[in-house]
Every structure is written in C-alpha cells, then in structure tokens.
Image (spheres, rainbow, N blue to C red):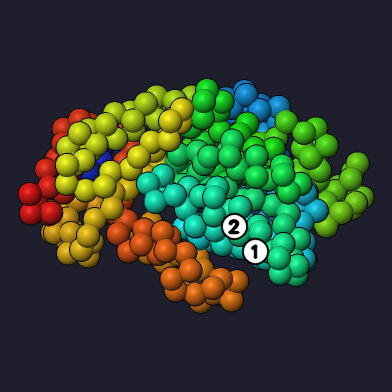
Amino acid sequence: MSRLDLKIPAEQVPALEFAGLKAQQSALGDQIAARMNAVLRHGHYIMGPEIAELESALARHCGARHAIGVSSGTDALAAALMVLGVGPGDAVFVPSFTFPATAEAAQLIGAEPVFVDVDPHLFTLDPAHLQDRIDDVNLRGRLRPSIVLAVDLFGQPADYEAIARIADAHAMTVIADAAQSLGASLNGAAVGTLAPITATSFFPAKPLGCFGDGGALFTDDDQWAEDLRSIRAHGKGNDKYEIVRLGLNARLDSLQAAVLLAKLPALAGEIAARQRVADIYDAGLADLVATPRRRPGARSAWAQYSILVDGRDRVRDRLNAQDIPNAVYYPRPMHLQPAYARFGEGEGSLPVSERLCADILSLPMHGYMSERAAGHVVAAVRSALGA
Ligand SMILES: *Cc1c(COP(=O)(O)O)cnc(C)c1O
C-alpha cells in the first residue's frame, strides 16, 4: 500500500519563513500523514469520527463546554450570528481594522456592520469608541444595537471585560472573532471562553491551521451548541431530511480534522516559542519602532508580530532586498473599502484604524523559528531603518 509522505526534509525548509508552515510540516509530517491515512482507510470524508474527537479535544483545550467544527472562520461567524437570530435591522459593531470576513459575516446574514475604531497600541476594539457608536445608533433609531463582534487581532484577546460591561448595559451579545487567537488567554481564561460565543479559523496560516479551509465555534450554552450543529448541516432536525431552520453547508471535513488532531498537541509549545521570538523582537527593536504592546493579563497567540514604521514602503523594499519575508495586515480599513464604504463615514472618521493601515508591518513569526533567525530579522530591520 502506498503511503502519504508529508514530512518535508529539514534541508528543504527555507532558513526564514513568514509563517513557518514548511518547518512545522517537517516536524509533524509523520503524525499528520498517519491521521490522514486513517481517514483514507475508513472513507467517512464527511462527519467521520475525527470530527467528534477533534471537537472534544478542542473543548478540553479551551475549557469550553462545546466546540463545533465548521468549514471556515467566516462560516463560523455567520453561524454564530444566525444562531443568535441576528438579521435585518440589527447593528453589528465591528472594528474597522480587521480582516474583511468580520464585517462580511454581518452583511451576509442581512444585518449591518457598524465600524468602530481600535486602540492605537493594542489594535483591538476601543471600548470608549464602542460606547459612542452605540449611542449614535440609538440616537438615529434606524438600527437595533444587537451584537458586538470583537476581534483578537494578531492573536491578542480584546478587552472582553470592558466590552461585556457595555454590551450588558444595552442587552447586546458579544461574539469573539478568535480567528487569530486560538491558544491565547486573558487573566487565566482561555480563548474560547472569553465571550458567550467564540468563532475561530483553521486557515493554514492561523496559529492552528489545517490544509485548507476550516473553523470552529465555542460556547458553554447547550441549546446554541445543538442549534449550531443543525445550522452547519442545512438546518437539519432529528434526521438529515427533517429541516427545521435555515442552515448552511458548513461542516468541517474529516481530513481537515485529522490534520488538526495531529497539530493540536503541538500548539501550546509553538505559542511559547512564538513568545520567545516576540521577546527577541521587542528587545532588538523597541528603541527604533513602535513594537506591539501587550494587554495586562493577556497571553497572545502571536499570530502576527506587527510593528508601526514611518515610511513603510521604503522599509519594505529594503527588507525584500534582504529576502526578509514581511506583510501588511491590513492595508485598508474596512470603512474605506469600496464594498463597505456605505456603512461608514468616510476618510478621517476612524483615525486610529486609518493610521494603523498606513504604518503597520508584520515580521516573520512562527513556532519553529530559531533565536538566530529572529536575531537575523532584527538586524535586517535595523539596517532597513538605517540604524
Ligand atoms: C482569517 C480570519 C477570518 C476568516 O477566517 P477564514 O477561515 O479564512 O474564513 C475572520 N476574522 C479574522 C480576524 C481572521 O483573521
């Protein structure tokens, strides 16, 4: 019998990778192949035994009562909004400085995104501005403030304590967009338990990634968990062809669950290694550029390490010339995107998000980076900045 061989020989792993996927596959390829082979043997490609096994492993990992595997982070967000009964007339408050899927999910289910600015140092939703925006919406009276969709940008949990206080005062529900933060924590509580419903993504480059699209939801609410399992399978009831609600085709594939089962045991160690890289970057760069601040009590998953630099394009050219991988997350705030501008108030309305989009620059970050490689990046950034 032929076998999957997923192990990348160490000598074929580039010295400097942006997200470390080849290095990870070199380390974990054998376990991943064994798990994938098991799926190929039993042939239950949809809702095979790997799904329930992964769901209980994920729930245990986070300390959440339920984990529900779904087809992507975007579908996880849409399903979370659907299970809460959100629709036309509802306002969903989202940060403007985020990946497009956050606002997209709100619009997909017929609600309206309301863009909120972010903290200039922590990059997550600014609670004071959230309060202002809720007051605006109430004053105009056209939409009902319903949901706060907070994003754990770059892997650091949002300020859930302050956000929950505001949401509670307005009878709103908080959804955590934890696409970048699985494995992070806030005051000792893991991501997955920081909001009533949490959505995450297993896109390959996220802290826990599969070999394609995938995602999951976390909740402690038994009814929501049951309904989310129905929503991901076309709104099924007690059997497959009893349809009790509008649903989606949003299941996680058995093969992707197999990949995740092989990678999950390594996640905590990988995040600890990312933290060491972040410490090296901090120590080597803090005198020259704005390095990412840490929220007190938070442990980031370090999906990205992002600095703020003046004259970013010139710095990028110099990094590219030295073969230092780098990326801009995100070049344009949501309220200035052509597809979303009609929900916003134009240029100048969310100044922090706008400035971050102009200056942000993400450096290589993953759990398989040597101290030497991190030191090399520091030296290259310093020389790119003319230091
Ligand atoms: C990646 C990402 C998503 C979407 O996840 P997909 O699995 O790609 O659909 C949503 N929100 C944020 C903040 C993300 O980074």
Going 13% across and 54% down the picture, which residue do you hit? 385
Query: Mark 2 sits on what residue?
Result: 132
Kind of residue sitting beneath label 1: Asp
Q: Nearer the viewer, residue 94 or 248?
A: 94
Position of residue 273 measured from the top left corner of the image (x, y, whole percent): 33, 28
Local SS, label 1? helix
Amino acid carrying label 2: it is: Asp
Please state the horizontal and vertical placement of residue 133, each as a whole percent of the image. 61, 59
Q: Residue at x 54, y 54 (%)?
A: 129
In the rendered image, which residue does mark 1 sit on?
Answer: 136
Q: How many marks?
A: 2
**Going 24% across and 55% down the picture, which residue do you hit?**
309
Q: Is residue 162 left or right of residue 174?
A: left
Residue 368 is drawn in which quadrant? top left
Is residue 353 visible in the rendered image? The answer is yes
Reply above or below: 21 against 187: below
Query: What is the C-alpha distance between the residues marked 1 and 2?
Result: 6 Å
Image marks 1 and 2: residues in contact by CB distance under 8 Å: yes
The disc label shown at residue 67, or none: none
Residue 276 x, y percent position in the rendering = 29, 28
Residue 297 appears at what percent x and percent y?
46, 27
